[in-house]
Image (cartoon, rainbow, N blue to C red):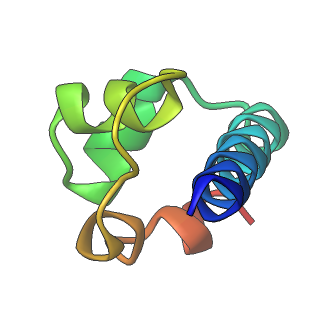
Amino acid sequence: MHDEHGECEAALTELREKLTDGLARARLTKTQLAVQTGLGRTTVQEAFRAGAPAPSAESLSGGWLITLR
């Protein structure tokens, strides 16, 4: 059980690193990303914050991957 939690945290850390890298490559601020994806600024901010719950699949599919490619 504890190992599974560690794996989830590692995957979440990797996701946040990829989102951060994509944001830098796209030369966007988090506010600009929120506008382009139609998500709330708080939703975007929380997705990048360590210790925050994982972003929902719905949030991630809201254009993030296309915008941050």
Q: Position of residue 5 (x, y in %)?
A: 58, 54
Tell me which residue sits at (58%, 73%) in the image.
66
Tell me which residue sits at (37%, 29%) in the image.
52
Residue 43 lies left or right of residue 68; in this view the side is left
Q: Nearer the viewer, residue 56 or 63?
A: 56
Q: Position of residue 55 (x, y in %)?
A: 36, 53
Q: Position of residue 48 (x, y in %)?
A: 52, 30
Quarter of the C terminus within the rendering: bottom right
Q: Using the rendered view, name the quadrant where residue 40 is placed.
A: top left
Q: Using the rendered view, name the quadrant where residue 65 is placed.
A: bottom right
Query: Which residue is farthest front?
Result: 1
Residue 44 lies left or right of residue 67; in this view the side is left
Residue 63 lies left or right of residue 2; in this view the side is left
Tell me which residue sits at (42%, 38%) in the image.
47
Tell me which residue sits at (41%, 31%) in the image.
32
For residue 68, above or below residue 53: below
Q: How many marks?
A: 0
For residue 22, above or below residue 29: below
Q: Nearer the viewer, residue 4 or 13?
A: 4
Residue 57 lies left or right of residue 29; in this view the side is left
For residue 7, above or below residue 23: below
Quarter of the N terminus within the rendering: bottom right
